Amino acid sequence: MPRASPQRQAWYLLLPMLAIMAVVTGYPLLNTIRLSFTDAILTGRRATPNWVGWDNFRYVLTDPNFGDAFGRTLYFAIVSVAIELLLGVLVALLLDREFVGRTIVRALLVLPWALPTIVNAILWRLIYNPEFGSLNALLSQLGLIDSYRSWLGHPDSAMNMVILADVWKNYPLVALIVLAALQTIPRELYQAAAIDGAGPWMRFWKITFPHILGPLTVALILRMIEAFKVFDIIYVMTRGGPADSTKTVSFFVYQESFSYLRAGSGAAYALVVALTSAVMIAAYITLLRRRERVG
Amino acid sequence: MNRRAKPLARILTYAAVLVLVIATLAPLVWLFIMSISSTKDLTSLPLHWLPDQADFSRYAKLLTVEAHSAGEEFVYALRNSLIAAIGASAIALVAGIPAAYSFSRYPGRMGLLYTVLGTYMMPPVALILPLYLVFSALNLLNNVAALVIVYCTILLPFVTWLLKSNFDAVPLEIEQAARMDGAGLFGVIRHVILPISKAGLGTAALFAVLLAWDEFFYALLYTNDLRAKTLPVAIADFAAGRATDYALISAAGILTALPPLLIAFFLQKSLISGLAAGGVKG
């Protein structure tokens, strides 16, 4: 067999992956774009859908319900990620200190992160249960509330309770990423700074923060991309309710497509969501490439 | 840095650690306690925090197959989850290894690499409708094979990316030495690259299985009964049922969570270094 040129070889090796990706990702993505310009409906019977031009997008972009869902999704993503970053840094700083049992505590921190998303959602739904839940029991036995509350049953508290459950599961990842960065900081830097008379606050901003800023930014964008897609935890905990107060964009697309069976407008909603994600993904990739170049 | 820490600082450190440990463990321990409690304990007011006696019957119930029982649903879902996770991970590795090697060893095509990474992060809503129509046309709805196929959209880019950074760490000289000895391309990959990156391969495989194990959205859309429902869908169904047996739901949750929890706890060093190398996924 004659030796293929290196360029050829490179492509041959990529071929299986590219073929699979073209079928499972490329083709469906193009088809979503095509669907979004039609009035297709999602039924077994295949009626020929009509081409409707930009109608679906005009409808999507002026739909106040979608606007609301978009706002709620941003609220969920920004609030949960902000808390995750804050908690992540605090816990990483704690775990970077010396104390007995540090290794085991660090191992425990992985557990919430490893818990399957659906199990986490069910666990917290049981904890929040309005009649028998342990949160109600705990707070009332401590005398903090007079009567049991329906944590997920009120439009003004439901989203924040979902955020709490999501943060509990996801902040450990941020903590572990930051901790890894903290451990690369040479201890001498701190000693030198202490000799120069820098207090703890000063040392944090002048030494610690610059060292963790890179990984923290990566974690920030990664978590935003993930949080913007949120679906599973909403589906299990609230199904988008009460009064749509937890209905996020993924849930919105799901309903439009699979409850109302409107494939055309569902695809248009999906593309608006995907484009928003694409902006964040592009930011992430730009960041990765820059880090790669810096080394 | 706090070798000579003041006593107050030490007390505060330990207090903070204690809070952290409780906050981390309490929900998990509570899930386990619920799973061994009786319904009476769980629905008593004020709440009985600890059951009078541990009742493991829910676990037995979930693992016993009887017609139209929760056990039947659970065991089938377990089977489906295993097939979907292992099948998709196997495909992802087989296609991902050569691709990762190509990205790692041949200059250029970085734009393509990042495009692949980007598709991994795309929200699944961008793909669900056409995939649904295709599976429906091929009669693959409610079939685990459909899940194996769609999980490749997530696992393949992920595995490729993770392995690429692993292969990058294999010194070029070792490879050149093997080539001098007359090894061909596949010989080099099989006898040089793969054995050296064994740990990375293991991490990639584990991550792939865990990602598939956790997947819910596609499984919810493309399956509807015993034949194809995975564990996350099955337990979401348990939880949505009218007559709710909280202990049963909790036990199903514990059983589903056990494999990832054990893997993460005992293999966290390699998982976290893999994560750092891959720079992806939460």
Image (tube, coloured by chain):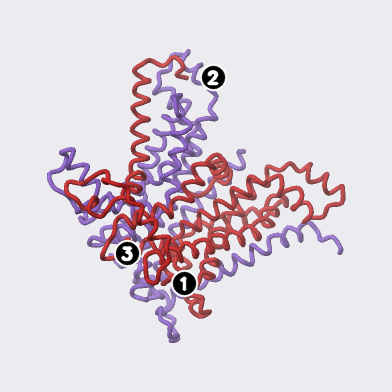
Chain colours: A purple, B red
Q: Is residue A143 left or right of residue A175?
A: left
Task: Give coordinates of residue A161: x percent, y percent.
Answer: 28, 49
Viewer-nearest residue: A218 or A259: A259
Name the mark on residue A188.
2
Q: Is residue A74 left or right of residue A215?
A: left
Name the mark on residue A66.
3
Q: Are marks 1 and 2 on the same chain?
A: no
The Cα atoms of the two marked residues, 3 and 2, are separated by 53 Å
The Cα atoms of the two marked residues, 1 and 2, are separated by 61 Å
The residue type indicated by label 2 comes to Glu
- Local crowd at mark 1 within 10 Å, few (<14), some, or many (≥20)? some
Q: Is residue B119 visible?
A: no
Marks 3 and 1 close (CB-CB < 8 Å):
no
Q: Is residue A135 left or right of residue B154?
A: left
Label 1 residue SS? loop
Q: In this rendering, is residue B6 above or below B275?
A: above
Q: In this rendering, is residue A195 above or below B72?
A: above
Q: Is residue A24 visible?
A: yes
